[in-house]
Amino acid sequence: GKPTLTMPRDFNLMFQTSVGAMSDASSTAYLRPETAQGIFINYKNALGTSRAKIPFGIAQIGKAFRNEITPRNFIFRSREFEQMEVEYFIPPGDDVWGDYHERWMKESKEFLLQVGLREDLMGWDVHEGDGLAHYARACTDITFRFPFGVQELMGIAARGNYDLTQHSEGSGKTLDYFDDATKEKYIPHVIEPSLGVDRLILALICSAYAEDEVGGEKRNFLKFHPSIAPVKVSVLPLVKNKEPLVKAARELFDTLKTRWNVSWDATGAIGRRYRRADEVGTPFCITVDFDTIEKDGAVTIRDRDSTEQIRLKIEEVIPYLSKQIDGY
Protein backbone atom coordinates (compact mmCIF):
# COMPACT_ATOMS: atom_id res chain seq x y z
CA GLY A 1 0.00 0.00 0.00
CA LYS A 2 0.88 3.67 -0.05
CA PRO A 3 3.12 5.15 2.68
CA THR A 4 1.09 6.57 5.56
CA LEU A 5 3.86 8.38 7.48
CA THR A 6 4.77 11.99 6.68
CA MET A 7 8.28 13.38 6.62
CA PRO A 8 9.62 14.44 10.04
CA ARG A 9 8.47 17.92 11.06
CA ASP A 10 9.30 20.25 13.94
CA PHE A 11 6.55 20.89 16.46
CA ASN A 12 6.52 23.73 18.98
CA LEU A 13 4.91 22.47 22.17
CA MET A 14 5.08 25.88 23.89
CA PHE A 15 2.92 28.90 23.05
CA GLN A 16 5.11 31.66 21.62
CA THR A 17 4.28 35.37 21.88
CA SER A 18 5.96 38.78 21.71
CA VAL A 19 6.41 41.13 24.64
CA GLY A 20 6.66 44.83 23.89
CA ALA A 21 6.14 46.94 20.78
CA MET A 22 8.97 45.39 18.75
CA SER A 23 8.49 42.09 17.00
CA ASP A 24 12.00 40.69 16.75
CA ALA A 25 13.90 37.89 18.44
CA SER A 26 14.50 39.98 21.55
CA SER A 27 10.75 40.24 22.24
CA THR A 28 10.02 36.52 22.03
CA ALA A 29 8.46 34.95 25.14
CA TYR A 30 6.60 31.76 25.93
CA LEU A 31 3.53 31.03 28.02
CA ARG A 32 4.42 28.73 30.89
CA PRO A 33 3.73 25.01 30.27
CA GLU A 34 3.65 24.35 34.03
CA THR A 35 3.45 26.43 37.20
CA ALA A 36 6.51 24.79 38.82
CA GLN A 37 9.24 26.88 37.20
CA GLY A 38 7.87 30.10 38.67
CA ILE A 39 8.36 28.55 42.09
CA PHE A 40 11.95 27.56 41.36
CA ILE A 41 12.79 31.04 40.05
CA ASN A 42 11.40 32.61 43.24
CA TYR A 43 12.86 29.96 45.56
CA LYS A 44 15.75 32.17 46.72
CA ASN A 45 13.45 35.14 47.38
CA ALA A 46 11.03 32.99 49.35
CA LEU A 47 13.89 31.49 51.33
CA GLY A 48 15.32 34.88 52.25
CA THR A 49 12.09 36.68 53.10
CA SER A 50 10.33 33.89 54.99
CA ARG A 51 13.45 32.65 56.83
CA ALA A 52 12.20 29.12 56.15
CA LYS A 53 14.22 26.08 57.13
CA ILE A 54 14.43 22.95 55.04
CA PRO A 55 12.21 20.99 54.72
CA PHE A 56 9.64 23.54 53.55
CA GLY A 57 7.25 23.91 50.64
CA ILE A 58 5.92 26.54 48.25
CA ALA A 59 2.46 26.01 46.74
CA GLN A 60 0.94 27.65 43.70
CA ILE A 61 -2.21 27.48 41.60
CA GLY A 62 -2.61 28.99 38.15
CA LYS A 63 -3.00 28.57 34.41
CA ALA A 64 -0.63 26.49 32.31
CA PHE A 65 -0.51 26.33 28.52
CA ARG A 66 0.64 23.51 26.24
CA ASN A 67 0.46 23.63 22.46
CA GLU A 68 -1.00 20.15 22.13
CA ILE A 69 -0.68 18.73 18.62
CA THR A 70 -4.05 16.98 18.80
CA PRO A 71 -6.29 18.41 21.53
CA ARG A 72 -8.90 15.82 22.43
CA ASN A 73 -10.31 13.72 25.22
CA PHE A 74 -12.45 16.41 26.82
CA ILE A 75 -10.32 18.12 29.55
CA PHE A 76 -7.50 15.57 29.40
CA ARG A 77 -5.63 16.91 26.40
CA SER A 78 -6.27 20.65 26.34
CA ARG A 79 -4.15 23.66 25.50
CA GLU A 80 -5.11 25.66 28.60
CA PHE A 81 -5.72 24.23 32.05
CA GLU A 82 -5.60 25.05 35.76
CA GLN A 83 -2.84 23.44 37.78
CA MET A 84 -1.98 23.17 41.48
CA GLU A 85 1.56 22.26 42.51
CA VAL A 86 3.71 22.11 45.61
CA GLU A 87 7.49 22.18 45.47
CA TYR A 88 8.66 20.69 48.75
CA PHE A 89 12.37 21.26 49.31
CA ILE A 90 14.27 18.57 51.19
CA PRO A 91 17.90 17.70 52.00
CA PRO A 92 19.88 15.71 49.42
CA GLY A 93 20.84 12.07 49.82
CA ASP A 94 19.68 8.73 48.48
CA ASP A 95 18.52 7.74 51.96
CA VAL A 96 16.40 10.88 52.41
CA TRP A 97 13.99 11.42 49.51
CA GLY A 98 12.22 8.04 49.75
CA ASP A 99 10.57 8.75 53.12
CA TYR A 100 9.42 12.20 52.01
CA HIS A 101 8.02 10.77 48.78
CA GLU A 102 6.07 8.11 50.66
CA ARG A 103 4.71 10.70 53.07
CA TRP A 104 3.50 12.98 50.29
CA MET A 105 1.84 10.02 48.54
CA LYS A 106 -0.03 9.21 51.74
CA GLU A 107 -1.04 12.79 52.50
CA SER A 108 -2.06 13.49 48.89
CA LYS A 109 -4.48 10.58 48.95
CA GLU A 110 -5.83 11.67 52.34
CA PHE A 111 -6.48 15.15 50.95
CA LEU A 112 -8.42 13.74 47.99
CA LEU A 113 -10.50 11.57 50.32
CA GLN A 114 -11.20 14.53 52.62
CA VAL A 115 -12.64 16.64 49.80
CA GLY A 116 -14.96 13.82 48.77
CA LEU A 117 -13.36 11.45 46.25
CA ARG A 118 -14.48 7.84 46.42
CA GLU A 119 -11.64 5.55 47.47
CA ASP A 120 -13.02 2.64 45.43
CA LEU A 121 -12.49 4.70 42.24
CA MET A 122 -8.88 5.62 43.06
CA GLY A 123 -5.72 3.71 42.23
CA TRP A 124 -1.94 3.98 41.90
CA ASP A 125 0.30 4.01 38.83
CA VAL A 126 4.05 3.76 39.49
CA HIS A 127 6.26 5.12 36.70
CA GLU A 128 9.23 2.92 35.92
CA GLY A 129 11.88 2.63 33.22
CA ASP A 130 11.04 4.63 30.09
CA GLY A 131 7.88 5.92 31.77
CA LEU A 132 9.97 7.95 34.22
CA ALA A 133 11.05 11.49 33.30
CA HIS A 134 14.80 11.83 32.75
CA TYR A 135 15.20 14.12 35.79
CA ALA A 136 12.97 12.15 38.19
CA ARG A 137 14.09 9.64 40.77
CA ALA A 138 10.55 8.38 41.23
CA CYS A 139 7.01 9.30 40.24
CA THR A 140 3.71 7.78 41.28
CA ASP A 141 0.33 8.88 39.97
CA ILE A 142 -2.97 8.71 41.80
CA THR A 143 -5.46 7.57 39.18
CA PHE A 144 -9.24 7.87 39.07
CA ARG A 145 -11.75 5.63 37.32
CA PHE A 146 -13.99 7.99 35.39
CA PRO A 147 -17.08 6.63 33.56
CA PHE A 148 -15.00 6.62 30.35
CA GLY A 149 -11.91 4.93 31.82
CA VAL A 150 -8.99 5.27 34.20
CA GLN A 151 -7.03 8.52 33.94
CA GLU A 152 -4.17 10.18 35.79
CA LEU A 153 -5.44 12.60 38.45
CA MET A 154 -2.43 13.62 40.51
CA GLY A 155 1.30 12.98 40.28
CA ILE A 156 3.80 12.86 43.14
CA ALA A 157 7.34 13.08 41.79
CA ALA A 158 10.80 13.08 43.35
CA ARG A 159 12.54 15.55 41.01
CA GLY A 160 15.97 15.58 42.65
CA ASN A 161 17.81 18.90 42.32
CA TYR A 162 17.50 19.04 38.53
CA ASP A 163 15.40 22.22 38.29
CA LEU A 164 17.36 24.36 40.74
CA THR A 165 20.63 23.16 39.18
CA GLN A 166 19.46 24.14 35.68
CA HIS A 167 18.32 27.59 36.86
CA SER A 168 21.58 28.11 38.72
CA GLU A 169 23.70 27.17 35.70
CA GLY A 170 21.57 29.22 33.31
CA SER A 171 21.53 32.37 35.43
CA GLY A 172 24.97 32.14 36.99
CA LYS A 173 23.39 32.69 40.41
CA THR A 174 24.00 30.35 43.30
CA LEU A 175 20.90 28.65 44.68
CA ASP A 176 22.70 26.86 47.49
CA TYR A 177 21.15 26.45 50.92
CA PHE A 178 23.23 26.55 54.08
CA ASP A 179 22.00 24.10 56.70
CA ASP A 180 22.63 25.54 60.17
CA ALA A 181 22.18 22.15 61.82
CA THR A 182 24.66 20.17 59.70
CA LYS A 183 26.84 23.13 58.60
CA GLU A 184 26.50 21.90 55.02
CA LYS A 185 25.86 23.86 51.85
CA TYR A 186 23.83 22.13 49.16
CA ILE A 187 21.21 22.55 46.44
CA PRO A 188 17.98 21.13 47.87
CA HIS A 189 16.10 18.26 46.29
CA VAL A 190 12.38 18.47 45.62
CA ILE A 191 9.22 16.42 46.06
CA GLU A 192 6.48 17.69 43.74
CA PRO A 193 2.79 16.85 44.16
CA SER A 194 0.99 18.15 41.05
CA LEU A 195 -2.77 18.18 40.53
CA GLY A 196 -4.98 19.28 37.63
CA VAL A 197 -7.86 21.35 39.02
CA ASP A 198 -10.16 20.62 36.07
CA ARG A 199 -9.65 16.88 36.50
CA LEU A 200 -10.21 17.13 40.23
CA ILE A 201 -13.55 18.93 39.78
CA LEU A 202 -14.69 16.30 37.30
CA ALA A 203 -13.62 13.52 39.69
CA LEU A 204 -15.53 15.22 42.52
CA ILE A 205 -18.69 15.37 40.40
CA CYS A 206 -18.31 11.70 39.42
CA SER A 207 -17.77 10.73 43.06
CA ALA A 208 -20.70 12.83 44.25
CA TYR A 209 -23.34 11.58 41.81
CA ALA A 210 -25.82 9.37 43.64
CA GLU A 211 -29.25 7.86 43.23
CA ASP A 212 -31.73 6.68 45.84
CA GLU A 213 -35.46 6.58 46.52
CA VAL A 214 -37.33 9.06 48.70
CA GLY A 215 -41.05 8.71 49.33
CA GLY A 216 -41.37 6.14 46.58
CA GLU A 217 -39.73 8.42 44.00
CA LYS A 218 -36.31 8.06 42.46
CA ARG A 219 -33.92 10.85 43.44
CA ASN A 220 -30.75 11.95 41.62
CA PHE A 221 -28.45 14.18 43.64
CA LEU A 222 -24.85 15.29 44.13
CA LYS A 223 -23.37 14.12 47.40
CA PHE A 224 -20.69 16.79 47.71
CA HIS A 225 -18.80 17.04 50.96
CA PRO A 226 -20.18 20.16 52.71
CA SER A 227 -16.76 21.82 52.71
CA ILE A 228 -16.56 21.86 48.88
CA ALA A 229 -20.24 22.07 47.90
CA PRO A 230 -20.65 25.19 45.70
CA VAL A 231 -23.81 26.19 47.58
CA LYS A 232 -23.75 25.37 51.29
CA VAL A 233 -27.29 26.25 52.33
CA SER A 234 -30.61 26.99 50.68
CA VAL A 235 -33.06 29.16 52.62
CA LEU A 236 -36.72 28.37 51.94
CA PRO A 237 -39.58 30.52 53.26
CA LEU A 238 -42.59 28.20 53.51
CA VAL A 239 -44.75 30.72 51.64
CA LYS A 240 -43.81 33.88 49.75
CA ASN A 241 -46.91 36.01 50.39
CA LYS A 242 -46.68 36.46 54.18
CA GLU A 243 -44.45 39.46 54.84
CA PRO A 244 -43.42 38.62 58.46
CA LEU A 245 -42.42 35.10 57.44
CA VAL A 246 -40.52 36.25 54.34
CA LYS A 247 -38.83 38.99 56.39
CA ALA A 248 -37.58 36.46 58.97
CA ALA A 249 -36.30 34.17 56.21
CA ARG A 250 -34.58 37.07 54.42
CA GLU A 251 -32.85 38.19 57.61
CA LEU A 252 -31.49 34.67 58.14
CA PHE A 253 -30.42 34.50 54.48
CA ASP A 254 -28.58 37.84 54.74
CA THR A 255 -26.79 36.68 57.88
CA LEU A 256 -25.72 33.33 56.40
CA LYS A 257 -24.48 34.79 53.11
CA THR A 258 -21.83 36.84 54.91
CA ARG A 259 -20.11 33.55 55.72
CA TRP A 260 -21.08 31.01 53.02
CA ASN A 261 -22.48 30.85 49.51
CA VAL A 262 -26.22 30.59 50.15
CA SER A 263 -29.20 30.33 47.80
CA TRP A 264 -32.76 31.64 48.14
CA ASP A 265 -35.73 29.66 46.80
CA ALA A 266 -39.31 30.77 47.47
CA THR A 267 -41.10 29.26 44.46
CA GLY A 268 -42.98 25.97 44.28
CA ALA A 269 -43.88 23.22 46.72
CA ILE A 270 -41.37 22.64 49.49
CA GLY A 271 -40.63 19.10 48.24
CA ARG A 272 -39.73 20.38 44.78
CA ARG A 273 -37.46 22.98 46.31
CA TYR A 274 -35.70 20.24 48.29
CA ARG A 275 -35.13 18.31 45.05
CA ARG A 276 -33.70 21.36 43.29
CA ALA A 277 -31.24 21.87 46.12
CA ASP A 278 -30.32 18.16 46.11
CA GLU A 279 -29.57 18.20 42.38
CA VAL A 280 -26.89 20.90 42.73
CA GLY A 281 -25.42 19.28 45.84
CA THR A 282 -26.58 21.76 48.51
CA PRO A 283 -26.01 19.89 51.81
CA PHE A 284 -28.55 21.78 53.96
CA CYS A 285 -31.96 23.36 53.44
CA ILE A 286 -33.45 25.69 56.04
CA THR A 287 -37.23 26.14 56.09
CA VAL A 288 -38.75 29.16 57.80
CA ASP A 289 -42.42 28.49 58.64
CA PHE A 290 -45.30 29.97 60.65
CA ASP A 291 -44.03 28.44 63.91
CA THR A 292 -40.80 30.38 63.40
CA ILE A 293 -42.55 33.73 63.70
CA GLU A 294 -45.53 32.78 65.90
CA LYS A 295 -44.28 30.20 68.41
CA ASP A 296 -40.75 28.94 68.92
CA GLY A 297 -38.40 31.17 66.87
CA ALA A 298 -36.91 27.99 65.41
CA VAL A 299 -36.32 26.75 61.86
CA THR A 300 -36.22 23.32 60.24
CA ILE A 301 -32.83 22.16 58.89
CA ARG A 302 -32.93 19.28 56.42
CA ASP A 303 -29.89 17.12 55.67
CA ARG A 304 -29.43 16.35 51.96
CA ASP A 305 -28.03 12.82 52.28
CA SER A 306 -30.31 11.35 54.95
CA THR A 307 -33.27 13.73 54.32
CA GLU A 308 -33.63 13.87 58.12
CA GLN A 309 -34.87 17.11 59.64
CA ILE A 310 -34.08 18.81 62.93
CA ARG A 311 -35.52 21.88 64.61
CA LEU A 312 -33.12 24.57 65.90
CA LYS A 313 -33.45 28.06 67.33
CA ILE A 314 -32.29 30.70 64.85
CA GLU A 315 -29.38 31.67 67.11
CA GLU A 316 -28.18 28.04 67.07
CA VAL A 317 -28.14 27.77 63.25
CA ILE A 318 -24.69 29.25 62.55
CA PRO A 319 -22.85 27.21 65.24
CA TYR A 320 -24.53 24.04 63.92
CA LEU A 321 -23.72 24.76 60.26
CA SER A 322 -20.17 25.82 61.12
CA LYS A 323 -19.54 22.44 62.73
CA GLN A 324 -21.06 20.55 59.80
CA ILE A 325 -19.42 22.58 57.01
CA ASP A 326 -16.12 23.83 58.42
CA GLY A 327 -15.55 21.24 61.12
CA TYR A 328 -15.42 23.66 64.05
Image (cartoon, rainbow, N blue to C red):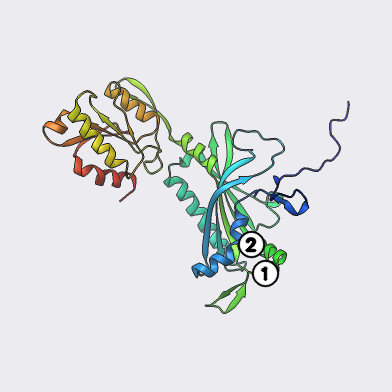
Furthest residue in direction front, as rendered: 21
- The residue located at (46%, 49%) in the rendering is 111
Rendering coords of residue 261 (x, y %): 36, 40
Residue type at numbered disc 1: Lys
From the viewer's side, name the closer residue of 57 and 160. Answer: 57
The residues bearing labels 1 and 2 have C-alpha atoms spaced at a distance of 19 Å
Q: Is residue 56 left or right of residue 245?
A: right
Q: How many marks?
A: 2
Query: Crowding near pointer 2: few (<14 within 10 Å), some, many (20+)?
Result: many
User: Residue at label 1?
Assistant: 173
Can you say whether 66 is above or below 97 in the image? above
Residue type at numbered disc 2: Gly
From the viewer's side, name the closer residue of 204 and 293. Answer: 293
Query: Crowding near pointer 1: few (<14 within 10 Å), some, many (20+)?
Result: few
Q: Is residue 308 left or right of residue 39?
A: left
In the picture, the quarter occupied by the N terminus is top right
Which label was assigned to residue 160? Answer: 2
Residue 87 visible (yes or no) = yes
Quadrant of the rendered structure where residue 267 is?
top left
Quadrant of the rendered structure where residue 146 is?
top right
- Helix, strand or loop under label 1: loop
Rendering coords of residue 296 (x, y %): 12, 36
Q: Earlier in the sequence, mark 1 or mark 2?
A: 2
Rendering coords of residue 30 (x, y %): 69, 49
- The residue located at (36%, 34%) in the rendering is 282
Quadrant of the rendered structure where residue 316 is?
top left
